[in-house]
Image (cartoon, rainbow, N blue to C red):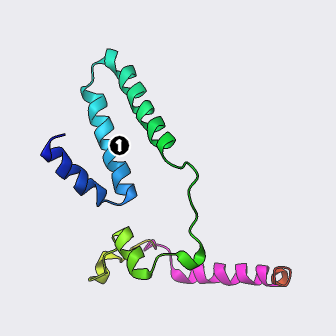
Amino acid sequence: MSEQLQNSIRMIQKLSPSEQIELMKATLQNVYNITKPAEKLNLFDTVFQLIREIFDSHETKPKKPSFLQSNTLDESIEEQHVKPVTNLDDVKTSFWPEEEPIDDFLVFMNRQRRMILPYEKDFV
């Protein structure tokens, strides 16, 4: 294995699981696009064989961590690559249509709540 490939693998291991899956998708798509039509079936067989080998060599039943053994907040932040919000404009959204007055929505919500209130006692 080349040093360049080893360095790449070390960098990939730092990615989150979802980022690693996205990388696998992109890599497989690239390999698929450059593979000759006659070799595409062989490519799929190879990929499925690799997946089988991985599952066979590891526990297929995921271990559920107990509540008391869950990650700390800092561990979860690091694992999920959470970045702090430094600019509120980054999280601002404009989901409310300008042509819709908020008053109509509030009237609707109040009507819905009045409809649900009599049934609330069934759920408490």
- Left or right, 92 with reference to 56: left
Q: Report if residue 103 lies within the magenta region.
A: yes
Q: Report if residue 69 lies within the magenta region.
A: no
Tell me the residue at 35%/76% (across/down).
91
Q: Residues within 10 Å of mark 1 (few under 14, many from 20)?
A: few
- Counting from the top left corner in percent of width and height, residue 45 is at 42, 25
Check disc 1 and report the residue beneath it.
Answer: 25
| Above or below 81: residue 61 | above
Helix, strand or loop for disc 1:
helix
- Counting from the top left corner in percent of width and height, residue 83 is at 31, 76
- Left or right, 27 with reference to 106: left
Tell me the residue at 18%/45% (across/down).
5
- Left or right, 119 with reference to 26: right
| Above or below 82: residue 124 | below
User: Image quadrant of residue 89?
Assistant: bottom left
Query: Residue extending furthest left?
Result: 3
- Counting from the top left corner in percent of width and height, residue 121 is at 85, 85
Tell me the residue at 27%/29% (across/down).
33
- Counting from the top left corner in percent of width and height, residue 105 is at 58, 78
Residue type highlighted by circle 1 = Lys
Quarter of the picture holding the N terminus:
top left
| Above or below 44: residue 6 | below
Quarter of the picture holding the C terminus:
bottom right
User: Image quadrant of residue 65?
Assistant: bottom right
Predominant secondary structure, magenta span? helix
User: Image quadrant of residue 24?
Assistant: top left
Query: Residue extending furthest front?
Result: 57
Query: Residue extending furthest top?
Result: 38
Q: Which residues are magenta?
A: 96-117
Tell me the residue at 31%/80% (across/down).
84
